[in-house]
Every structure is written in C-alpha cells, then in structure tokens.
Amino acid sequence: MPNLSDPRLADYANLRDVELRKSLEAEHGLFIAEGEKVIRRAVAAGYPVRSVLLAPRWAEPLADLLDELGDRVHVVDDAVVEDITGFPVHRGALAAMERLPLPTVEQVLTGHGALSRGIQALDDPAGRGAPSQPIPAVKDLHDHDHSPNHEQGHDHEHEHEHEHEHGDVERVEARSQLPRRVLILEDLVDHGNVGAIFRCAAALGVEAVILSPRCADPLYRRSVKVSMGAVFAIPYARMTNWHGGLAELRAAGFQTLALTPDQSVTSLDRVAMAERVALLLGSEGDGLSSRWLREADEAVCIPMSPAAMGFGVDSLNVVAAAAIACHGLMRGGSADLPYQQS
C-alpha cells in the first residue's frame, strides 16, 4: 500500500479542482491520461511517463507497458485511487505524463509541428504497438546523447555523393507534409468541447489545430479523455498574438473561412476553396469575435432547416458544428491529405 503523502502521488491529487490542476500541471509540466486506450496512445505519441496509478484489475491488460516502468507503477485499490484523486476513476488507470515542448504556429503551418508523433498515433489507433524504444522516465529527457553516430569505417565520400539526392527527397517530403486543412479555435474555454473537436478533426482528416491564447488546454484531463487520445494524433500550437494571428495564417498562404450561424453568407458546401484553408471556429457562447469575422477572407455557414429556424432552432452547438464543418472542409482533394482515414 503506497503512502498517500508520497510526493510521487502528488501528480494525481485533487483532479476535480480545475483551477488548482491547471496551475499545478503548468508548473510541473505534466498532464494526466485516463484509461488504457488513452494511456497507450500517449505513449505511442512519445510522451514520457512520470508514473502510473491503477487498480489491480488493470495490471494485466497494461502489463506490456508496466513492465518497463518499474517503481513508477502504483497498484492500489479503487478506494485509494478515489481518496487520492477526489472522485471514482471508472476507467481504473491513470498515468502522469510529461509534456513535450509545444511547437510554434509557424512550425505547425510549415509541417514541422510534431507530425511524426501524430502519424504514429494514427497508424496505431488502438495504441497497442510496442514502443520502438523503452518508455522513458522524465529524467531520461536529458540523458540522451545527441551527438552524431560516427560508425567505424563510415564511407564519407559515399555520403557526399548522395547528399544532393537526399536533399531533393527531403524537400519533396517537406512539401507533402505541409498542412492544407487546419482548424483555428478562438477562445473555446470548455475542455470537453476542445477535446471533442480534436477528435472530430483527427477523424475527418484535418491536419492541424491552432488555438487562440485563451483557448482551453487540449492536454487537460477532460480534454484528453473526451478526445479519446486524438489530441496526440494531430499537431497543434497556441498563438501568442491574437490580434495579429490571422495575418500569420495569410502569410503562410491560407485562405481563412469564418464559420458563423448567419444564413445570409455563403454556404460552406458552396465556397470555392484554395489549396490551403483555415476554418475559424468561435467560442461556445458568442461565436467568433467581430475582429476575426472582419479579417477572414470569407464568412461561411452550415445551412439550417428553415422549418427548424421558424421554431427558434437557429444554430448548432460548437462540437456538432465543428464535426459538420470538418467534413465540409475536407471536400475536394481530401483523399490526398496525409491524415485522411479510410
């Protein structure tokens, strides 16, 4: 039985206190993955494991991961888990994970925003593939030797001979990884909504998500849980400058479409889309700000039933709207997009 005052268990304390958890997780650079599938997807995406807290019934299903974690695994009764976390953990397993550096907006828009992690998580949607390397502890992040691997007898002349060829291949690959369809979320503050939108975006083939500065954290426990780990499968970044955020998108060659319930604007299924398109979604209550509505290249809507509107049903909740909009966004050449799922 672990000591409840053990500092290694502090990562799991008071999980229902949203404000406390937001400050704690920011301070310590951690997030909580809940449930076997989500934990596996986080590991597959390359997030280092700080520790695992689980009920005995989950020890066998997660045995392949736990064997590598040693004393970072805490197996306790359900009642103890509830005492530590402050609520019944129905999925029975929690993992404290180390956050990775968040890419910049520029890195995501140029295809360098942790794309390899996203592709790996999508290629192994159940997260059951064995990690290619041992699961790292937090301290291991600084233990790797990043020096070049000078193998004995390496043929440097042969390397230079093919340098130009490799450079061409890398440039072609870089072009193919440029995201062409992205979501931009402005001031969505509900963690569940953010997680659900990430799930829609990843499932329908959207290649990246950009958050305004005030958006909820995709790695907060509820976001991760609702997304079923989709937050690990799609690159994302957070703007540092809301005021000029859309200018950065235009500079990267994106057409910006602002989604609004206003039925007088162009229907999303009729708009002429450019090669690179960013769809803007606004907050749960007020929708997009007037500034972003003005700055967008075009306002678009999801057509609503006139009969329903006559009864006062004039809009969709943001998650439903996001799902329909993501589907519409992917029309026209979407089969060529790297994240499109069959």
Image (cartoon, rainbow, N blue to C red):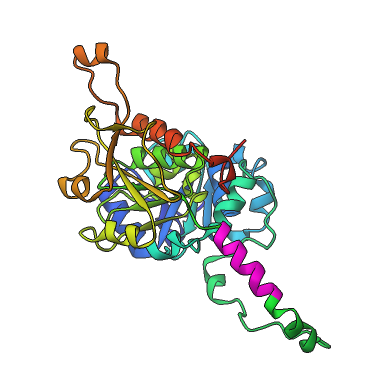
> Which residue is found at the position 28% from the left and 60% from the top?
247
Residue furthest left as drawn: 290
Q: Is residue 286 magenta?
A: no
Residue 180 location in percent, x, y?
47, 51
Of 331 and 159, nearer the camera is: 331
32 in relation to 78, above or below: below
304 in relation to 13, above or below: above
Q: Is residue 250 visible?
A: yes
Whether residue 59 sits left or right of residue 201 in the image: it is right
Of 6 and 279, nearer the camera is: 279
> Which residue is found at the position 24% from the left and 30% from the top?
261
> Which residue is found at the position 62% from the left and 58% from the top?
69
Residue 178 location in percent, x, y?
51, 58
Whether residue 142 sits left or right of residue 310 in the image: it is right
Looking at the rendering, the stretch of residues picked out in magenta corresponds to 165-176
Of 57 and 50, nearer the camera is: 50
